[in-house]
Image (cartoon, helix red, strand yellow):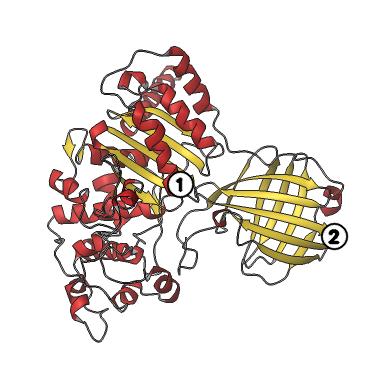
Amino acid sequence: MIYKKSIAAMLFIIFCVQVNSQSSLPRSTPEAEGVSSKNIIRFLDAANSSKTEFHSFMLLRHGKVVAEGWWNPYSADLKHTLYSTSKSFTATAIGFAVSEKLLSVNDKVVSFFPNDLPDTVNAFLSALTVKNVLSMSDGQEPDPTGMVVGRDSNWVKGFLSTPILHYPGTEFLYNSLGTYMLAAIVQKVTGQTVLDYLKPRLFEPLGIQGEDWETDARGINTGGWGLRLKTEDMAKFGQLFLQKGSWNGKQLLPVSWIEEATTAKILQDPDAPQSKRDSSDWLQGYCYQMWLCRNEAYRGDGAFGQYIIVLPKKDAVIAITAETPDMQEEINLVWKHILPGLQDEALPEDAAASLQLKEKLASLALPLPANANSSSLQKILKGKTFKLQPNEKNIQSISFKFDNDVCYATITDSAAHTFAFGAGKWMRSTTTMHGPNLVAGAKNNLNGLPAFITDGAYRWTEDKTLELTLRFTESPHTYTYICSFDGKKVAVNVKTSFYFGKGDINIPGEMTK
């Protein structure tokens, strides 16, 4: 019996290894694939001193991972919000539907939604095609996303009723709601959400698991944002495009679609001077929900620095997750440090640089709140609740409990959410509380997703001021709560990371027990 159990256990382990090897990209060393370890080290050093808070980085060369790293508490097993990099996946769903002859890029958008049309369908709306939407030339100005998603429960109807001011196809005008319309079109012609439609066609063949995607109130994936994937999943997507739609010997997408989707359809600013174009990765031309870059590359691109960069001439893919106030600076680091390190031939082994790179990648970490210290208030605050005055965050109360080097804070909005904050260390929690989000005003925002992962750390900046750092680690963003105590009163200053020092909210409160 013991022998049989041992054999079964061995077979299970072998099965798990085989599954993992099938779902993971192959690994290699930088020099073996013609990449300089020293250049990657320079990139990481520059990243750590830049405006950008990097969360993850993965470099593929010749289809193999040669460098990968996550800035603790971010990690390889966590998903990360992609924001507008989601758009490239929505466009890919359109590509599959086109290849299955379910639609054409020349189909008129109005043809899919006869029951949601405005009373008057003018010539501009009537002319709008799927291709126009794919290439961000819908003609609506400004981008109607913010207005419609916060106001309407039927976003399709809201989009179609928004005036088109420029003839479709003539001007580049960014439009995230347009990408949502692509998701709605996919659902209309397939009977499935974009997420479900892509699972057997894209995610499963690439070994991508655990993906999720926000929906609107009617169950349509948001399309232009809301997809969450792991860093390696992002890299796989880029590699699929680099390989012209082929994966493990099978053609998942036609070569013709890959080429059509990654070549310029419209210029963002045709009148921009050459000097401006030469310094910008946002003026090289727009494809199908992808951007052309300098250096003969193209990319999926999401707010605050989520990138899938494909360099066909260099046979390389770079995936990055981050939070940055300067996306151009972030991508400039790639051009300055990584690009020159991509050589045509294998490089001689550099043992010293290779070891230094491994150590640097393994030690990547975001700074913890310094000077954790302790306070005479910790015993006094234990079990105490402070009721807060009405505020835009809808935080009704906050209470505290200290246990050794951990602060447990319960933040109550429509429900009570308890988080662990470590002194000089990150403590992980899960929560249903919504974190900072660029599209927080959308109806149904973040609903339908599983509980969110957070990492918390605390410090006393002085005896009466407690600072709680709460990272929503599957997103780019962080809340910081600075609680200043004065007897039975508290003032809670709430900082949202993507405001980069602006937009703080101050909430007064008073002890209730």
Secondary element type, mark 2: strand
Amino acid carrying label 1: it is His
Tell me the tag on residue 90: none
Residue 484 figure quarter:
bottom right
Residue 155 coordinates in the image, percent (x, y): 35, 72
Q: Quadrant of the C terminus?
A: bottom right
Residue 401 coordinates in the image, percent (x, y): 77, 50
Q: Residues within 10 Å of mark 2 (few under 14, many from 20)?
A: few
User: In this rendering, does residue 142 appear at all?
Assistant: yes
Q: Which residue is label 1 attached to?
A: 80
From the viewer's side, name the closer residue of 367 and 456: 367
Q: Is residue 374 left or right of residue 200?
A: right
Residue occupying image coordinates x 63% and y 63%: 415
Say if 271 sits above or below 115 in the image: above
Sequence-earlier tag: 2 or 1: 1
Residue occupying image coordinates x 43% and y 69%: 146
Q: Which residue is label 2 attached to?
A: 486
Amino acid carrying label 2: it is Asp
Say if 219 sits above or below 246 in the image: below
